[in-house]
Image (tube, coloured by chain):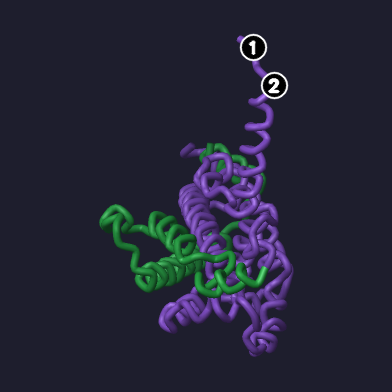
Chain colours: A purple, B green
Amino acid sequence: MTISNGDGDSAAKDGRRERKRKRRAEPSLVKWKTEGEQKTYSSKLIEALRRVRRSSATGAASAATDHSRSRAVREAADRALAAAARGRTRWSRAILCGRTLKRRVLPRAGRPKPVGPARAAERSKPPALKTKARVLGRLVPGCRKLPLPSLLEEVSDYIAALEMQVRAMSVIAEALSAVGGAPSPAQTEGPI
Amino acid sequence: MSSRRSRSRQMSSSRITDEQINDLLTKLQAVLPEAHLRSTDRVSAAKVLQDTCNYIRSLHREVDDLSERLSELLANNDINSAQAAIIRSLLR
């Protein structure tokens, strides 16, 4: 079997060019469903959980309320999830840049709408859609001022990532509740 | 060049078409939980956006509940290296 380089090459190049354009526009959603990705995320999350536990133990025990600890767990989980996205999506970059930036961005949200072709595009959408799109943009980190097509792409990736996060955290919680209960390492090897 | 501009104004946008948005909405609808119940013909944009918002909110709530559960489990006992190894083997 011979591989022809003549026409096939240019066709492959066109296909690659098209694929390159598509790859930039649509981050692959399949990777969030793979077991490997979930295992990697679970390991990273376990390490982060150990850090949270250590930091809450060394700090003032009275100040470490349940709520602040669960908040720290949630933030560690979100940060690990954003790191798993490898910076290809806007929401992951927004999470990694730190939640404090979100508060700084708020005053800028009052800016007037951009002039030009963008205004024509917004006029085509009914106001009900606009408000729903704005609510959606507020739910996804870092996507408040995004135009609708980019917002929808970010949303689909964010949903897939969140589903993986829920799956991984459930598995860890089940494993911890099965294994935990004994602070000393010697007793944990008994039932297993 | 001026003819292109007037044509784009008639199409209501130069790059973003309604078809593109509809296509993205269809894909988004496929990801939502009750995708198998809905017919694939009609994509009501408002309904898809509303369902997406609700779904993201419910996912956030699940993550919060799991974080609370994990923090409670952590409070009782730290994950030492032996337990971490056991958990990793359970995940495998």
Residue B36 drawn at (x, y percent): 29, 53
Q: Residue sitting at 67 percent across and 68 percent down? A: B1
Instruction: Provide the secondary structure element on which disc 2 rests.
Output: loop
Label 1: how many residues lie within 10 Å, few (<14), some (14-19) or many (20+)? Answer: few
Question: Do badges 2 and 1 share one subunit?
Answer: yes
Residue A45 drawn at (x, y percent): 62, 54
Label 2: how many residues lie within 10 Å, few (<14), some (14-19) or many (20+)? Answer: few
Chain letter for the residue marked with disc 1 in the picture: A
Residue type at mark 2: give it.
Answer: Asn
Residue A56 drawn at (x, y percent): 68, 68
Residue A62 drawn at (x, y percent): 64, 78
Q: Quadrant of the N terminus of chain A?
A: top right
Residues A153 and A162: in front is A153
Q: Real-space Cα distance between discs 2 and 1?
A: 9 Å
Q: Residue sitting at 55 percent across and 70 percent down? A: B7
Q: Residue sitting at 69 percent across and 52 percent down? A: A86
Name the disc covering residue A2, or none: 1
**In the shown orientation, is residue A178 left or right of residue A17?**
left
Q: Quadrant of residue B74?
A: bottom right
Chain letter for the residue marked with disc 2 in the picture: A
Q: Residue sitting at 42 percent across and 70 percent down? A: B49
Can you identify the residue that label 2 sits on? A5
Instruction: Provide the secondary structure element on which disc 1 rests.
Output: loop
Name the disc covering residue B31, or none: none
Residue type at mark 1: give it.
Answer: Thr
Q: Is residue A99 visible?
A: yes
Give above or below for B9 relative to A177: below
Q: Is residue A70 visible?
A: no
Question: How many marks can you see?
Answer: 2
